Image: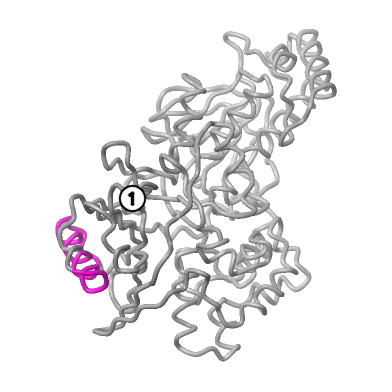
Amino acid sequence: MDSDNGDLSQLGQRRRLLLQALGTSTLVGGLSLNGRALAQTLTPDKGKALDVAIIGGGLAGLTAARDLQRAGCESFVVLEARNRVGGRTYNHDLGDGVISEAGGQWIGPSQTAIFDLARELGIGTFPSYYQGKNVYLVGDAKYEQDISDGLSLPVAEKINELARGVPSKEPWTAVDAARLDKLSVGQWLAQQGIDNEAKLSFDLSIGLTTGTPPANLSLLYYLSIVNSADCSIEKLERFKDGAQETRIVGGSQALSIRMAEDLGDKVKLSCPVRKIVDWDRDIVEIHTDQGVIRSRQVIVTLHPGLCNQIVFDPPLPEGRAQLQRLWPSHAPMRKTVHVYERPFWRDKGLNGQVSQADGPLILSYDNSPQDGSLGVLAAFVRTAQLPLDASQAQSTLATIYAKALGDEALSPKQFHDHDWGKVDSWTLTCVGSIPPGFLTRWGRYLKPAVGRLIWSGTETADIWASGMEGAVRSGRRSALEALHALTGERSTAG
């Protein structure tokens, strides 16, 4: 038993108050909102261990912290390695209150948790701009096509039907999981006999969604993502009525910034966790660059591969340790921004979406502010084919835009380049890129708690894993799991 367990009568009293609060108050999103009653149970004892330490100040960690606080728990801390909050969301400040998102940015139908969070925080949303024609560049040729109502992908119905049998919560439990996980999406598409044009469409859409080409992506994993999107590949991949339909006022990072402001000094920046000791005992020691934190429960919201950079003492169980060690981390993504006086392409009936089959540009899109006061072209690019030097990268892409959209593209006011593989040590990858054979072998170790460690983060979400929606959902689930664990602990102590 731990020395803190000497105050058994006090813990018993706190446990009874917690049970009373949980039993008598209204539940919203799985958490009690009777803050006064819960606050009586979970107020911190000075000099004692915290109730919860949260590792990671992105959407998952801050949502978990916010839900703990709403439930009345004040005995927690958020430990963020970077000097900012937001994780894989980050805003480029373009001046005069205008931003362009360098990381995750879109939300769409069925992503209810993040819409609810934005509304609760008083942050608005607005439609993405996608009206007009797309431009396709193939060698020296240029093609324009209006696909604002969505591009009909071949074999889409086959994919949708297969996705109905792959639960996004635990895809490795699907009836046909072993067979589906042996195949890459590329292998499966080849078996369908699709033509080169269709293959290019899938290469583009899947590459943007998962950060890896179809040849490297598990069919089982991809079907689980489609399952999240109401078993509709169309809803997953397109703008209109799809996952890219809506943007967040002030940029996606605004959600984390607002939550952190509300949490105040409970958020510790520039505080990377180096070692976690005694995760299998009553009190866990978390060793950070700012000292040692002691806590009863620990919510870890990091990417599974990033968890492997932390030393665990004792070592984690073999299954969880292997999952972290082998989790793929090779899809960092690189996004650029060109800023113009106005969105001139709209005057030409173009929507700013440009795709290049054989060059550095994967896809550009209109990321202008809602009022169109500036013209903003953001883009996903092929890092290996675009110069690392900023001025060269700007010029290379501007020349491509000029060919697709007009010579006005040659004179941007600003240029921004964010390579997630180089900006810091805390971003291994931005999106999910699970290879064949991984989920059926290691997936079962992803979510179950290990000792006092509760695993969170978007990769652990039951739906919309690897997206912002998944991050929010995982944060709410982990907060509830921590509260339940504390209740059980105090029930035993009392």
Q: Main secondary structure of the magenta part?
A: helix
Q: Position of residue 333 (x, y in %)?
A: 38, 58
Question: 464 above or below 237?
Answer: above
Identify the residue at the far front of this view: 347
Quarter holding the N terminus is top right
Magenta-span inclusion, residue 336: no
> SS class of the residue under badge 1?
loop
Question: 349 above or below 477?
Answer: below
Question: 24 above or below 211?
Answer: above
Q: Residue at x 39, y 72 (%)?
A: 133
- Return the residue nearer the eye: 133 or 329: 133
- Return the residue nearer the eye: 381 or 234: 234
Q: Does residue 345 appear left or right of residue 175 in this picture?
A: left
**Which residues fall within the magenta stretch?**
386-406
State the count of labels. 1
Q: Position of residue 181 (x, y in %)?
A: 65, 72
Among the 4 quarters of the image, the one containing residue 163: bottom right
Q: Does residue 138 appear left or right of residue 219 in this picture?
A: left
The residue that mark 1 highlights is: 372
Local crowd size for mark 1, using a 10 Å CA cut-off: few (<14), some (14–19), many (≥20): some
Q: Residue at x 54, y 49 (%)?
A: 304
Quarter holding the C terminus is top right
- Return the residue nearer the eye: 417 or 376: 376
Q: Residue at x 35, y 72 (%)?
A: 355
Magenta-span inclusion, residue 394: yes
Q: Position of residue 469 (x, y in %)?
A: 58, 48
Amino acid type at circle 1 is: Gly
- Return the residue nearer the eye: 395 or 190: 395
Q: Position of residue 6 (x, y in %)?
A: 73, 10
